[in-house]
């Protein structure tokens, strides 16, 4: 008689926090930069001269609820 032996297909190993934290900080800073360009890059707070960035993110600005007119 052959008995079937169950073996898990894969083992899950936890990822240490010290390996995740730099990527989480990098992702958070990237998201803050994105929110700045979508939400505040116009007028007095403008880093880039002209309206190029504003026009590029214009529809996304309205989609996320940022007023600009």
Image (spheres, grey):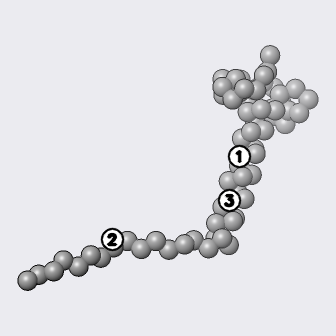
Residue, x 66% and y 61% (percent of image)?
Answer: 23
32 or 8: which is nearer to us?
8
Q: Earlier in the sequence, mark 2 or mark 3?
A: 2
Find residue 18 and report its image quarter. bottom right
Q: Earlier in the sequence, mark 1 or mark 3?
A: 3
Q: Position of residue 56 (x, y in %)?
A: 68, 27
Which of the image's four quarters has the C terminus? top right
Q: Residue 61 location in percent, x, y?
A: 71, 27
Q: Residues within 10 Å of mark 1 (few under 14, many from 20)?
A: few
Query: Mark 1 or 2, which is nearer the eye?
Result: 2
Local crowd size for mark 3, using a 10 Å CA cut-off: few (<14), some (14–19), many (≥20)? few
Say how many tags the image has. 3
Query: Along the line of sight, which residue is nearer the eye, 65 or 23?
Result: 65
Q: Residue at x 33, y 71 (%)?
A: 9
- Residue on which the image places disc 2: 9
Q: Residue drawn 42% across and 74% down?
A: 11
Residue closest to the far right: 44
Tell me the distance, in whole angstroms, between the alpha carbons under discs 1 and 3. 10 Å
Looking at this view, is 14 or 61 the one in front? 14
Label 1 close to label 2 by CB (< 8 Å): no
Quadrant of the image containing the N terminus: bottom left
Q: What is the spatial separation of the Cα atoms under label 2 and label 3, in whole angstroms?
A: 29 Å
Q: Which mark is residue 44?
A: none
Label drawn at residue 24:
3
In terms of sequence position, does the residue under pointer 1 or pointer 2 come before the other?
Answer: 2
Q: Is residue 17 above or below residue 45?
A: below
Q: Quadrant of residue 26?
A: bottom right
* Residue 31 numbered tag: 1
């Amino acid at each position: 008689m052959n008995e079937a032996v169950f073996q898990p297909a894969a083992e899950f190993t936890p990822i240490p926090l010290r390996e995740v934290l730099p990527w989480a900080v990098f992702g958070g800073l990237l998201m803050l930069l994105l929110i700045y360009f979508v939400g505040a890059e116009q007028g007095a707070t403008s880093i880039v001269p002209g309206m190029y960035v504003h026009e590029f993110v214009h529809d996304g600005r309205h989609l996320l609820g940022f007023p600009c007119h």
